Every structure is written in structure tokens, then in C-alpha cells.
Image: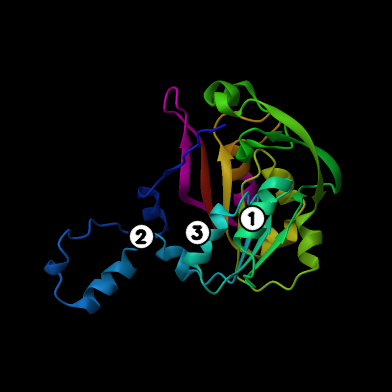
Amino acid sequence: MNIPKITKQIIRTPFHAVGLDLIRRKSDPGEVEDPGMLAALSQKYNPNHWLVAAGIQTVLDVGAHMGEFAQRIAIMLPDAELVCFEPLQEPFDKLTARFAGNTRVRTFRCALGEQPGQFEMHHNEYAPSSSLLPMANLHKKSFAFAVKSKPETVEVRRLSDVVRELKLRDPILLKLDVQGFEDKVIHGGEDVVARAKIIIVEVSFQTLYLGGPLFDDIYRMMTARGFSYRGNFEQLVSPNDRQVLQADAIFCRK
């Protein structure tokens, strides 16, 4: 069955919040005669320049799915090591196949949370909507193709316990895309959060998963841990009324 993809819209203007100015590049390359100047302009106005300039050495991709974010970030940060976590068997197999032979990428088949153990996950027919939490009615009404799910038992580990076994290089970027389980991952990895320089966390502005935190909850958690909100990497809007439902919020250490 062909299942439509939930497409997040890339947001450009919030990058001003992290000190970036975006300009429209000249349509005719001939208008810039100096190749060196063109290269400098390209680097200066690259919307991801702020991330490159942060000097990130390790990316922790929690909720990696099939490696979509990991692949993008690997291109942006060619010298960084990636550690990817994905609990569902089918996406995990595709994740490992995508990075087969890449020594910069390590993969773990597990979910992350506050308490370790074996838990039942709601494996959604649209895999990126899968969660350890039940889906709320708003999610079902907004995305009819992501209604059905089946149970799948997965291992849940604490981020702190996993990282203790690894030798990670600082600075660290932590990315969380765990469908309402963000606060549990943070509570289970406080020492890792304390090491992180940048955290990109999926936040919801309305309840999409029962028991999951909303933006205000995550904002308070992040600011209490020494981070400041710097805008959104991407965001998801409702196909019904175009309200913003979720965003990948950027938090940088103050």
C-alpha cells in the first residue's frame, strides 16, 4: 500500500535567531565574477552554517527510523561520529543497510526512556508515527493514513547507560524524535544532556500522543538545564486547518 508521507516544512526565518542572515542568491552565476567571492558568499549564507560552526564531533540520533536525519547530518558534519537508536525491527534493518560499511555510524536497536526493560510499542502503519504512547484523537483525525497500529515488544534502555559504554567525543548534538517520549529520554540521560551543546527535539503544540509533553513542558525542561530556544529546524502543519502541530525545536547551550 502506498502510504502518503507526512512532510515537514523547512523553516528558514528562525535561523536569524542563531545569528544568520539569509539572502536571495543571484540567479545568473555570471553576475559574480570572482569564484572566491561566490564560495565565500555560499558559506556565509549557508542556512546550516551555524551548525557546522558549532564544531560538533558526535551526533546522537534518538528515533533514527531509517536514517533520514542521520544521512542529512552526515553530509553537513562530515567529521562527526553518529550513534543512531531505532527500536522497530523493519526500520532498523533499513537503517543498518543504509550505513553498511560506514565506520562513522553506530546503530542500536532499542528505544530510550527513563526506565529500562521490555515494553510494548505501538507499531504504526506509518512507521514514523509509532510510539510507546497511545495516539490521541487529533493525530488520527489529522492523518488518516496513520491510524492503524500493531503491538511490537521492544527493548528500552536509558541513554546514560548506553553512553557509559561508549567513548564519545564532545561537543555533542542530541536529536530526539520519539513521538511523545522526549521527557522520558531526557530524564534517563541527564548526564548526556549536560554534555550536549545543541539539542534538536521534536515538540508538539497540541496533544498528539496521550501523556506526552507539549512545547511549554520541553521549553521549561531545556531552559532549566541551561539551554535557550533558538528557533525551529522543521515543522509539521495540519492538513486540515494548517495549524502548526509539531516542530523540531533547536535548543543551544547558553
Q: Secondary structure at mark 3?
A: helix
| Residue at horizontal 74 percent and vertical 61 percent from the top | 191
| Residue at horizontal 39 percent and vertical 49 percent from the top | 14
- How many angstroms separate mark 1 from mark 2 (CA)? 32 Å
* Location of mark 2 (residue): 20
Q: Hey, what amino acid is under mark 3?
A: Arg
Mark 1 closeness class: few <14, some 14–19, many ≥20 residues within 10 Å: many
- What numbered label is drawn on residue 95? 1
Q: Secondary structure at mark 2?
A: loop
Kindly indicate the quadrant of the structure image that contains residue 182: top right
| Residue at horizontal 45 percent and vertical 22 percent from the top | 240
In the picture as drawn, the residue positioned furthest to the front comes out as 1
Question: Where's residue 253, x and y in %?
Answer: 56, 61
* Location of mark 3 (residue): 72
- Depth check: 159 or 99 in front? 99
Question: Where's residue 146, x and y in %?
Answer: 60, 29
Mark 3 closeness class: few <14, some 14–19, many ≥20 residues within 10 Å: few
Between marks 1 and 3 in the image, the one whose residue lies nearer the viewer: 1
Mark 2 closeness class: few <14, some 14–19, many ≥20 residues within 10 Å: some
Point out the stretch of residues depicted in magenta. 220-245
Q: Hey, what amino acid is under mark 2?
A: Leu
In the figure, 170 relative to 157: above or below? below
- How many angstroms separate mark 1 from mark 3 (CA)? 13 Å
